[in-house]
Protein backbone atom coordinates (compact mmCIF):
# COMPACT_ATOMS: atom_id res chain seq x y z
CA UNK A 1 0.00 0.00 0.00
CA UNK A 2 1.05 3.60 -0.47
CA UNK A 3 0.04 7.06 0.59
CA UNK A 4 -1.68 9.16 -2.07
CA UNK A 5 -0.94 12.78 -2.96
CA UNK A 6 -2.13 16.03 -1.35
CA UNK A 7 -5.68 16.33 -0.08
CA UNK A 8 -7.91 18.51 2.05
CA UNK A 9 -6.62 18.84 5.60
CA UNK A 10 -8.71 17.68 8.52
CA UNK A 11 -8.75 13.93 7.93
CA UNK A 12 -6.06 11.21 7.62
CA UNK A 13 -4.12 10.65 4.43
CA UNK A 14 -5.79 8.14 2.09
CA UNK A 15 -3.93 4.86 1.77
CA UNK A 16 -3.81 3.25 -1.70
CA UNK A 17 -3.61 -0.44 -2.52
CA UNK A 18 -4.28 -3.03 -5.22
CA UNK A 19 -6.26 -6.26 -5.10
CA UNK A 20 -5.32 -8.89 -7.69
CA UNK A 21 -7.67 -11.70 -8.73
CA UNK A 22 -6.21 -14.53 -10.79
CA UNK A 23 -8.28 -16.02 -13.63
CA UNK A 24 -11.33 -13.87 -13.02
CA UNK A 25 -14.45 -15.21 -14.77
CA UNK A 26 -16.82 -12.57 -16.13
CA UNK A 27 -20.57 -13.08 -16.55
CA UNK A 28 -20.09 -13.60 -20.30
CA UNK A 29 -17.78 -16.56 -19.55
CA UNK A 30 -14.73 -14.54 -20.56
CA UNK A 31 -11.66 -14.91 -18.36
CA UNK A 32 -8.98 -12.38 -17.51
CA UNK A 33 -5.70 -13.90 -16.39
CA UNK A 34 -5.21 -11.21 -13.79
CA UNK A 35 -7.72 -8.55 -12.76
CA UNK A 36 -6.42 -5.62 -10.74
CA UNK A 37 -8.70 -3.50 -8.58
CA UNK A 38 -7.21 -0.31 -7.23
CA UNK A 39 -8.63 1.21 -4.06
CA UNK A 40 -8.07 3.83 -1.38
CA UNK A 41 -9.02 3.71 2.28
CA UNK A 42 -9.22 6.37 4.96
CA UNK A 43 -9.45 5.58 8.65
CA UNK A 44 -9.52 2.15 10.27
CA UNK A 45 -12.15 -0.58 10.72
CA UNK A 46 -13.73 -1.08 14.13
CA UNK A 47 -15.27 -4.41 15.16
CA UNK A 48 -17.91 -5.15 17.76
CA UNK A 49 -17.67 -7.90 20.36
CA UNK A 50 -18.87 -10.42 17.77
CA UNK A 51 -16.13 -9.52 15.29
CA UNK A 52 -18.43 -7.66 12.91
CA UNK A 53 -17.11 -4.47 11.36
CA UNK A 54 -19.40 -1.64 12.43
CA UNK A 55 -17.97 1.49 10.77
CA UNK A 56 -17.10 0.63 7.14
CA UNK A 57 -18.47 2.88 4.40
CA UNK A 58 -18.25 1.94 0.71
CA UNK A 59 -18.26 4.91 -1.68
CA UNK A 60 -18.87 4.07 -5.34
CA UNK A 61 -18.07 6.44 -8.21
CA UNK A 62 -19.87 7.17 -11.46
CA UNK A 63 -19.23 6.31 -15.11
CA UNK A 64 -15.73 7.37 -16.16
CA UNK A 65 -14.74 8.32 -12.62
CA UNK A 66 -12.65 6.73 -9.90
CA UNK A 67 -12.39 6.66 -6.13
CA UNK A 68 -10.05 9.63 -6.35
CA UNK A 69 -12.94 11.90 -7.33
CA UNK A 70 -14.19 11.83 -3.74
CA UNK A 71 -10.94 13.21 -2.33
CA UNK A 72 -11.74 16.85 -3.03
CA UNK A 73 -12.55 19.97 -1.06
CA UNK A 74 -16.19 19.90 -2.17
CA UNK A 75 -16.68 16.23 -1.21
CA UNK A 76 -14.21 14.97 1.37
CA UNK A 77 -13.86 18.47 2.78
CA UNK A 78 -17.59 18.48 3.53
CA UNK A 79 -17.98 14.89 4.80
CA UNK A 80 -14.71 13.41 6.10
CA UNK A 81 -13.46 15.98 8.62
CA UNK A 82 -13.84 16.02 12.42
CA UNK A 83 -17.48 16.21 13.43
CA UNK A 84 -18.75 15.81 9.86
CA UNK A 85 -21.21 13.17 8.67
CA UNK A 86 -18.54 10.62 7.67
CA UNK A 87 -15.83 11.73 10.11
CA UNK A 88 -12.89 9.45 9.30
CA UNK A 89 -11.93 9.32 12.97
CA UNK A 90 -15.13 7.30 13.36
CA UNK A 91 -15.71 5.72 9.93
CA UNK A 92 -13.55 3.51 7.71
CA UNK A 93 -13.95 4.85 4.17
CA UNK A 94 -13.34 2.53 1.18
CA UNK A 95 -12.97 4.05 -2.30
CA UNK A 96 -12.51 1.43 -5.05
CA UNK A 97 -11.88 2.11 -8.73
CA UNK A 98 -14.39 -0.01 -10.62
CA UNK A 99 -13.43 -2.47 -13.35
CA UNK A 100 -12.50 -0.44 -16.43
CA UNK A 101 -11.95 2.74 -14.43
CA UNK A 102 -9.17 4.69 -12.76
CA UNK A 103 -6.15 2.57 -11.92
CA UNK A 104 -8.02 -0.75 -12.11
CA UNK A 105 -7.70 -3.09 -15.10
CA UNK A 106 -9.21 -1.51 -18.23
CA UNK A 107 -9.09 -1.81 -22.02
CA UNK A 108 -6.51 0.96 -22.47
CA UNK A 109 -3.97 -1.05 -20.46
CA UNK A 110 -3.24 -3.01 -23.63
CA UNK A 111 -6.03 -5.44 -24.52
CA UNK A 112 -8.13 -2.69 -26.13
CA UNK A 113 -11.29 -4.24 -27.66
CA UNK A 114 -10.10 -7.70 -26.59
CA UNK A 115 -10.75 -6.77 -22.96
CA UNK A 116 -13.68 -8.77 -21.51
CA UNK A 117 -17.08 -7.12 -21.97
CA UNK A 118 -17.76 -6.55 -18.28
CA UNK A 119 -21.15 -5.66 -16.81
CA UNK A 120 -22.39 -4.01 -13.63
CA UNK A 121 -22.84 -7.52 -12.22
CA UNK A 122 -19.10 -8.12 -12.61
CA UNK A 123 -18.28 -4.78 -11.04
CA UNK A 124 -20.44 -5.40 -7.95
CA UNK A 125 -19.10 -8.95 -7.54
CA UNK A 126 -15.54 -7.65 -7.52
CA UNK A 127 -16.40 -4.91 -5.03
CA UNK A 128 -17.75 -7.60 -2.69
CA UNK A 129 -14.63 -9.73 -3.14
CA UNK A 130 -12.39 -6.73 -2.46
CA UNK A 131 -14.12 -6.20 0.86
CA UNK A 132 -14.43 -9.79 2.02
CA UNK A 133 -11.33 -11.46 0.58
CA UNK A 134 -8.80 -8.64 0.69
CA UNK A 135 -9.84 -6.06 3.29
CA UNK A 136 -11.52 -8.46 5.71
CA UNK A 137 -14.76 -6.45 5.85
CA UNK A 138 -17.78 -8.55 6.82
CA UNK A 139 -20.31 -5.73 7.20
CA UNK A 140 -20.90 -2.21 5.91
CA UNK A 141 -22.40 0.66 7.80
CA UNK A 142 -23.29 2.36 4.52
CA UNK A 143 -23.08 1.99 0.75
CA UNK A 144 -23.20 5.40 -0.94
CA UNK A 145 -22.95 5.66 -4.70
CA UNK A 146 -23.11 8.45 -7.27
CA UNK A 147 -24.67 7.88 -10.71
CA UNK A 148 -23.30 4.48 -11.83
CA UNK A 149 -22.18 3.94 -8.24
CA UNK A 150 -25.74 4.66 -7.14
CA UNK A 151 -27.00 1.98 -9.50
CA UNK A 152 -24.46 -0.37 -7.95
CA UNK A 153 -25.85 0.55 -4.53
CA UNK A 154 -29.31 -0.66 -5.57
CA UNK A 155 -27.69 -3.91 -6.72
CA UNK A 156 -25.79 -4.28 -3.43
CA UNK A 157 -29.07 -4.01 -1.55
CA UNK A 158 -30.57 -6.88 -3.54
CA UNK A 159 -27.56 -9.18 -3.82
CA UNK A 160 -26.24 -8.78 -0.27
CA UNK A 161 -29.28 -7.63 1.76
CA UNK A 162 -27.77 -8.40 5.18
CA UNK A 163 -24.34 -6.95 4.44
CA UNK A 164 -25.13 -3.28 5.13
CA UNK A 165 -27.21 -1.13 7.44
CA UNK A 166 -27.93 1.67 4.97
CA UNK A 167 -27.91 2.49 1.27
CA UNK A 168 -27.79 5.91 -0.36
CA UNK A 169 -28.00 5.86 -4.17
CA UNK A 170 -27.67 9.31 -5.74
CA UNK A 171 -28.54 10.48 -9.26
CA UNK A 172 -29.95 7.24 -10.65
CA UNK A 173 -33.09 5.14 -11.03
CA UNK A 174 -33.75 1.50 -9.99
CA UNK A 175 -35.06 0.41 -13.40
CA UNK A 176 -33.76 -0.74 -16.75
CA UNK A 177 -31.93 1.98 -18.67
CA UNK A 178 -34.35 2.90 -21.45
CA UNK A 179 -35.92 5.93 -23.12
CA UNK A 180 -33.70 8.97 -23.62
CA UNK A 181 -31.11 7.67 -21.16
CA UNK A 182 -30.49 4.60 -23.31
CA UNK A 183 -30.54 6.68 -26.49
CA UNK A 184 -27.87 9.01 -25.14
CA UNK A 185 -25.70 6.06 -24.18
CA UNK A 186 -26.14 4.60 -27.68
CA UNK A 187 -25.15 7.95 -29.19
CA UNK A 188 -21.95 7.95 -27.15
CA UNK A 189 -21.09 4.36 -28.05
CA UNK A 190 -22.03 4.74 -31.71
CA UNK A 191 -19.96 7.92 -32.03
CA UNK A 192 -16.91 5.82 -31.18
CA UNK A 193 -17.72 2.52 -32.86
CA UNK A 194 -18.89 4.08 -36.14
CA UNK A 195 -15.76 6.19 -36.56
CA UNK A 196 -13.44 4.46 -39.09
CA UNK A 197 -10.47 5.69 -37.05
CA UNK A 198 -11.61 3.52 -34.16
CA UNK A 199 -10.26 0.54 -36.14
CA UNK A 200 -11.99 -2.04 -33.95
CA UNK A 201 -10.24 -0.60 -30.93
CA UNK A 202 -6.72 -0.65 -32.39
CA UNK A 203 -6.40 3.08 -33.10
CA UNK A 204 -3.05 4.85 -32.80
CA UNK A 205 -4.61 8.21 -31.94
CA UNK A 206 -7.97 8.83 -30.32
CA UNK A 207 -10.76 8.65 -32.96
CA UNK A 208 -12.60 11.85 -33.83
CA UNK A 209 -15.82 10.24 -32.64
CA UNK A 210 -14.59 10.64 -29.09
CA UNK A 211 -15.21 14.38 -29.39
CA UNK A 212 -18.86 13.75 -30.33
CA UNK A 213 -19.18 11.40 -27.36
CA UNK A 214 -17.79 14.07 -25.06
CA UNK A 215 -20.25 16.63 -26.46
CA UNK A 216 -23.13 14.35 -25.46
CA UNK A 217 -21.68 13.76 -22.00
CA UNK A 218 -21.39 17.50 -21.37
CA UNK A 219 -25.00 18.15 -22.34
CA UNK A 220 -26.50 15.24 -20.42
CA UNK A 221 -24.57 16.05 -17.26
CA UNK A 222 -25.11 19.80 -17.31
CA UNK A 223 -27.40 22.21 -15.50
CA UNK A 224 -28.98 24.89 -17.74
CA UNK A 225 -29.24 27.36 -14.86
CA UNK A 226 -25.61 26.94 -13.84
CA UNK A 227 -24.29 27.06 -17.41
CA UNK A 228 -26.25 30.25 -18.04
CA UNK A 229 -24.67 31.75 -14.94
CA UNK A 230 -21.15 30.62 -15.90
CA UNK A 231 -21.50 31.60 -19.57
CA UNK A 232 -23.93 34.53 -19.96
CA UNK A 233 -22.54 35.60 -23.36
CA UNK A 234 -21.79 33.88 -26.65
CA UNK A 235 -18.06 34.34 -26.16
CA UNK A 236 -18.18 32.97 -22.63
CA UNK A 237 -20.22 29.94 -23.74
CA UNK A 238 -17.78 29.12 -26.54
CA UNK A 239 -14.82 29.44 -24.18
CA UNK A 240 -16.45 27.29 -21.51
CA UNK A 241 -17.32 24.58 -24.04
CA UNK A 242 -13.75 24.50 -25.36
CA UNK A 243 -12.39 24.21 -21.82
CA UNK A 244 -14.79 21.43 -20.86
CA UNK A 245 -14.11 19.42 -24.03
CA UNK A 246 -10.32 19.70 -23.73
CA UNK A 247 -10.39 18.75 -20.06
CA UNK A 248 -12.44 15.61 -20.76
CA UNK A 249 -10.39 14.59 -23.79
CA UNK A 250 -7.20 14.86 -21.76
CA UNK A 251 -8.39 12.17 -19.35
CA UNK A 252 -10.54 9.96 -21.61
CA UNK A 253 -9.72 6.95 -23.78
CA UNK A 254 -12.23 5.90 -26.45
CA UNK A 255 -12.12 2.17 -25.68
CA UNK A 256 -12.44 2.77 -21.95
CA UNK A 257 -15.42 5.08 -22.46
CA UNK A 258 -17.11 2.66 -24.84
CA UNK A 259 -16.80 -0.18 -22.32
CA UNK A 260 -17.93 2.00 -19.43
CA UNK A 261 -21.22 2.83 -21.11
CA UNK A 262 -21.75 -0.64 -22.51
CA UNK A 263 -21.42 -2.10 -19.00
CA UNK A 264 -24.89 -0.73 -18.14
CA UNK A 265 -26.66 -2.79 -20.81
CA UNK A 266 -28.13 -5.41 -18.43
CA UNK A 267 -28.81 -3.17 -15.43
CA UNK A 268 -32.33 -3.59 -14.04
CA UNK A 269 -32.86 -3.98 -10.28
CA UNK A 270 -36.61 -3.34 -10.52
CA UNK A 271 -37.77 -6.99 -10.31
CA UNK A 272 -35.96 -7.51 -6.99
CA UNK A 273 -36.62 -4.32 -5.03
CA UNK A 274 -38.56 -6.21 -2.36
CA UNK A 275 -35.33 -8.05 -1.47
CA UNK A 276 -33.80 -4.87 -0.06
CA UNK A 277 -34.01 -4.87 3.74
CA UNK A 278 -31.50 -2.15 4.62
CA UNK A 279 -32.59 1.42 5.23
CA UNK A 280 -32.45 3.14 1.84
CA UNK A 281 -32.56 6.81 0.92
CA UNK A 282 -32.53 7.66 -2.80
CA UNK A 283 -31.58 11.23 -3.73
CA UNK A 284 -32.01 12.89 -7.14
CA UNK A 285 -31.92 16.53 -8.21
CA UNK A 286 -34.72 18.21 -10.14
CA UNK A 287 -32.36 19.50 -12.84
CA UNK A 288 -30.85 16.08 -13.63
CA UNK A 289 -31.14 15.65 -17.42
CA UNK A 290 -30.28 11.94 -17.19
CA UNK A 291 -32.91 11.13 -14.54
CA UNK A 292 -35.55 13.85 -15.04
CA UNK A 293 -38.20 14.04 -12.30
CA UNK A 294 -41.10 14.19 -14.74
CA UNK A 295 -40.66 10.46 -15.39
CA UNK A 296 -42.12 9.74 -11.95
CA UNK A 297 -40.25 6.43 -11.81
CA UNK A 298 -38.58 6.68 -8.43
CA UNK A 299 -41.76 7.77 -6.65
CA UNK A 300 -43.43 4.57 -7.83
CA UNK A 301 -40.55 2.15 -7.31
CA UNK A 302 -39.54 3.36 -3.85
CA UNK A 303 -42.84 2.11 -2.43
CA UNK A 304 -41.60 -1.43 -3.00
CA UNK A 305 -38.54 -0.94 -0.79
CA UNK A 306 -39.40 -1.96 2.76
CA UNK A 307 -37.44 0.81 4.48
CA UNK A 308 -37.02 3.10 1.50
CA UNK A 309 -37.50 6.83 1.06
CA UNK A 310 -36.80 9.40 -1.62
CA UNK A 311 -35.68 13.02 -1.69
CA UNK A 312 -35.77 15.32 -4.72
CA UNK A 313 -33.43 18.29 -4.40
CA UNK A 314 -35.08 21.36 -5.97
CA UNK A 315 -33.34 23.35 -8.68
CA UNK A 316 -31.23 26.23 -7.40
CA UNK A 317 -28.13 28.18 -8.32
CA UNK A 318 -26.17 25.69 -6.22
CA UNK A 319 -27.36 22.48 -7.92
CA UNK A 320 -25.24 21.05 -10.74
CA UNK A 321 -27.69 18.97 -12.74
CA UNK A 322 -26.65 15.33 -12.74
CA UNK A 323 -23.42 16.36 -11.04
CA UNK A 324 -25.27 17.47 -7.90
CA UNK A 325 -24.37 14.04 -6.56
CA UNK A 326 -20.77 15.17 -6.07
CA UNK A 327 -21.63 18.19 -3.91
CA UNK A 328 -22.72 16.84 -0.52
CA UNK A 329 -23.26 20.34 0.84
CA UNK A 330 -26.63 19.97 -0.93
CA UNK A 331 -27.60 16.60 0.59
CA UNK A 332 -25.45 15.96 3.67
CA UNK A 333 -28.36 16.62 6.05
CA UNK A 334 -30.26 13.76 4.43
CA UNK A 335 -27.21 11.51 4.91
CA UNK A 336 -27.10 12.40 8.61
CA UNK A 337 -30.78 11.50 8.91
CA UNK A 338 -30.23 8.18 7.13
CA UNK A 339 -27.36 7.25 9.42
CA UNK A 340 -29.45 8.14 12.44
CA UNK A 341 -32.46 6.05 11.47
CA UNK A 342 -30.34 3.07 10.42
CA UNK A 343 -28.24 3.04 13.58
CA UNK A 344 -28.30 -0.36 15.18
CA UNK A 345 -29.85 -0.56 18.65
CA UNK A 346 -27.93 -2.96 20.89
Image (cartoon, helix red, strand yellow):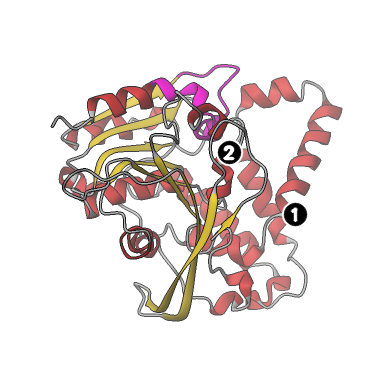
- On screen, 203 above or below 272? below
Where is residue 311, by image quadrant? top left
- On screen, 260 above or below 23? above
| Visible residue check, residue 75 | no
Q: Residue at x 40, y 28 (%)?
A: 294
Where is residue 24, by image quadrant? bottom left
Q: Residues within 10 Å of mark 1 (few under 14, many from 20)?
A: few
Q: Secondary structure at mark 1?
A: helix
Of 320 and 142, the residue lying toward us: 142
Expressed as whole percent of the image width and height from the top left, the position of residue 179 reads 42, 45
Q: Residue at x 36, y 75 (%)?
A: 28
Of 343 and 60, the residue lying toward us: 343
Q: Residue at x 48, y 58 (%)?
A: 98
Label pair 1/2, CB-CB below 8 angstroms: no
| Visible residue check, residue 227 | yes
Residue ID for mark 2? 221
In the picture provided, is 192 more to the left or to the right than 161? right
Expressed as whole percent of the image width and height from the top left, the position of residue 257 reads 59, 60
Q: Residue at x 73, y 24 (%)?
A: 230
Q: Residues within 10 Å of mark 2 (few under 14, many from 20)?
A: some
Of 15 and 225, the residue lying toward us: 15
- On screen, 185 above or below 109? above
In the picture provided, is 42 more to the left or to the right than 215? left
In the picture provided, is 232 more to the left or to the right than 304? right
Residue ID for mark 1? 250
Expressed as whole percent of the image width and height from the top left, the position of residue 304 reads 18, 36
Residue 262 colored in magenta in the image: no
For the residues labelled 1 and 2, the Cα–Cα distance comes to: 18 Å
| Residue stretch rendered in magenta on the structure | 314-333
Amino acid sequence: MSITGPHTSGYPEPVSGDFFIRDFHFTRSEVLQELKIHYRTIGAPVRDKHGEVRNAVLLLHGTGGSGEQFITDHFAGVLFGPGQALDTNRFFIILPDGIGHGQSSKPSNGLHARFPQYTYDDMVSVQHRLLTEHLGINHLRLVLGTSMGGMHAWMWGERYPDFMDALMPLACLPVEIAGRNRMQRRMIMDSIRNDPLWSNGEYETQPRGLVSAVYIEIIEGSSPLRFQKLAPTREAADTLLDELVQARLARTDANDLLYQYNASRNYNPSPGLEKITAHLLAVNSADDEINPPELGIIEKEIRRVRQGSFVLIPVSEETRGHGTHSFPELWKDHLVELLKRSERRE
